[in-house]
Image: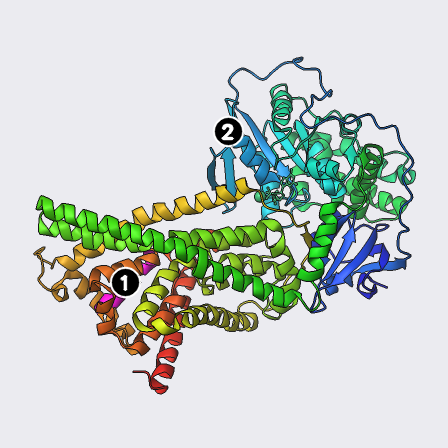
Amino acid sequence: MTLRDIREGQSARVLAVGGSGALRQHFLDMGIIPGTDVKVVKYAPMGDPVEICLHGYELTLRLDDAGRIDAEPVPDAAPQAAPPPKPVSEHLGLGEGGRFHPKGSGDPLPEGTTLTFALVGNQNSGKTTLFNQLTGAKQHVGNFPGVTVDRKDGAILGQANTCITDLPGIYSMSPYSSEELVSRNFVLSEKPKGIINIVDVTNIERNLYLTMQLLEMDIPVVVALNMMDEMTGNGGSVDVNAMEAMLGVPVVPISAAKNQGVHELVDHAMHVANYQERPLRQDFCDENDHGGAVHRCLHAVIHLIEDHAKAAGLPVRFAACKAIEGDRLIIEQLRLDENERETLEHITLQMEKERGLDRSAAIADMRFAFITKVCERCVKKPGESRERARSRRIDSVLTGKYTAIPVFLGVMALVFYLTFNVIGAALQDLLAAGIEALTAAADGALTAAGVNEVLHGLIIDGIFEGVGSVLSFLPIIVTMFFFLSLLEDSGYIARVAFVMDKLLRRLGLSGRSIVPLLIGFGCTVPAVMATRTLPSERDRKMTILLTPFMSCTAKLPIYAFFVDAFFPERKALIMIGLYVLGILVGILVALLYKKTLFKGEAVPFVMELPNYRLPSARNTLQLLWEKAKDFLQRAFSVILIATIVVWFLQSFDFRFNLVEDSHQSILAAVAGLLAPVLAPLGLGDWRIATSLISGFMAKESVVSVLEVLFGAQGGVAAVLQPAAAASLLVFSLLYTPCVAAVASVRRELGRRWALYVVLWQCAVAWLAALLVRLICLALGAV
Ligand code: GDP
Ligand code: MG
């Protein structure tokens, strides 16, 4: 019997974990180990995947993968009798002084050394929240060398000579996705002076699994028990002193969201890093545990490889664990002799035989056995916490059998409605009025001052019109990001992935692809970057290639401009129609890819479903500020320059004489070359070609260039027919994404794929636009 045969609501005990390689390791790291009890919570509305609960948290699995896990039903765990009272020493309040280490003894690092810290923890444990608290707004955002994974560095507030790095969330030091590899490599090769390990205390067993591996790294560690407010609010508590004693590192209870205990955390982190106090204890295997097979094996291997690990600069205990697990990267780095390899294999085989588990499961089990001991001794768990009960109630609707999909559609509709019709639109009108007033004032001032006419033209018709029209979209873009980040941070998007997985699989994607695709409605650049959480290269590539079909916010000005000019009565319908068209074409292309470029199955889908949480205002504001800043920078760099260049090219001819009529300008001549290609679409005018070219720089500039070239909206309306306007809308929906997006594709997938994206999108756009124009013509629209 396997896990997929267990009914909803039933509990089962894992007997054996099948599968192989990284996936299997991932199962084990997530706590699915022979002997563990799991409960099948529910099946997704479409019957696949399944949500299970183990170690007190929720996880999703596909039925296929559940079928690889042998299990037998067990009677539902009886409501646990109150645990026997244990001698709990009163735990420290938030931020109260710890008693772990004698302050100020030993040899500090030389004065002036920069203390580098890595912030490591599971996904959704509050890393970003803590990072923002620690650094204030002063941070440097970049990429990790060689990969486009966001890297945020910042100095700790009030501490000179510090640098803390927010690493991608990981569950284990066995890399499963490319993000996990980044985090592991950072810790292994950049050797930070200290690690701040953030642990979600409401989900402590799974979080401590990573802690155990960090302790093996032989780098000073401080454990920050986050979400302490939730824990104590529900009547739970942690015996911090006992936990410090068991783990051998300082443990600090904090609440990142409420900024409690953070100072204390910083004190401890500074201390252990400054005095290089390494974890006191790295030996977690117990000689009494199941006859001690794992313990003996580990220590034998530690002695066996000690010299190799030192030579390779690897922490010994960590290297030994990985060598036993069969981690190829580490084994290669160790450069073992033939004899040593064989010895390693023999020791491991003997352990497997004695322990009755295979090597990976045995090591994972050893870690969880220790964690169980720690939790039994130090953690008083609340009954079902209010947050969890709330999550369950919310989930009964949001992932309910009949409600999930209607709710999802409703939520998306609401987001779009609020963005485009209510909040964003109102702010946009306000801003547009402001810009208009400013333009009029500047116009008046220039006229009064008698400024040269050419310069006057450049400033008013070029810069003010062009940049101004783009600027007025700032509110809509920020509002859109606000909602998307709300959905993501609250934990809803993970549910969407759970609900939609089966559907997306039909297209050859996985449920997780929904995140980048939804972000794609905001901007393609972060969407492409968001794909790095996808563990399979194939899914990742395919998702990246599909994001450009999701209409990004930068294209909104184009839609608004043309819809206002041509179809004012059917504004909403056409706007929504364009979004839907993008999605439909994306689906067709996905089906095509599935048959051609990306044959084969989407990879397993193992994902945690975090509790719903209210995102902190600070995180959200920070994000909005970053987006707004980014947009403003673009408006005043790329778009400003594009506008000026276009204005210049259309105002002069090849002999740099001011032209009377822009038909004789340089621009007309150059763009005229492209016009014939666009002629079948009804877009043969050189000015349209120009605006589309500038759209490659930034989509927003299509409109600003049109404004410069045609004057106000009436100008375009006189030149284009409605059918051509429709084809233009479709073309701009689908054609090549902007330079920034292409650059991010290049960083993720390489130059060839980036070029492919540009050409392929143009081809698809051309065909679709032609089709739309023909349909419009056939329907009688002129
Ligand atoms: P990350 O994925 O590790 O970067 O986690 P985030 O910083 O994005 O936090 C995940 C969620 O937990 C957010 O909704 C936060 O508002 C919330 N959160 C973070 N710290 C705390 C805390 O101390 N208490 C509570 N109640 N919520 C928190
Ligand atoms: Mg984060």
Q: Identify residue for label 2.
A: 155
Q: Which amino acid does label 1 sit on?
A: Ser
Label 2: how many Cα within 10 Å (few below 14, some 14–19, many 20+): many
> Which disc is residue 253 wearing?
none
Please, what is the three-letter code of the amino acid marked with disc 2? Ala
Q: Name the residue under label 1.
A: 691
What secondary structure do most residues of the magenta stretch adopt?
Answer: helix
Give me the C-alpha separation between circle 1 and circle 2: 43 Å
Of the 4 image quadrants, the one containing the C terminus is: bottom left
x 49%, y 47%: residue: 148
Q: Say which of 477 and 748 sits in front.
A: 477
In percent of width and height, residue 486 lies at: 55, 51
**Is residue 457 visible in the rendered structure shown here?**
yes
**Secondary structure of the residue carrying numbered label 1:** helix
Figure quarter occupied by ligand 1: top right
Q: Locate residue 751, reporting x and y percent.
A: 42, 56
Image side of residue 51 versus residue 708, left or right? right
**Count of marks placed on residues:** 2
Position of 499 relative to 120 (above/below): below
Q: Does the residue labelled 1 lie within 8 Å of ligand 2?
A: no
Q: What stretch is highlighted in magenta?
A: 686-697
Image quadrant where residue 6 sits: bottom right
Q: Which residue is drawn at 38% across and 49% down?
A: 631
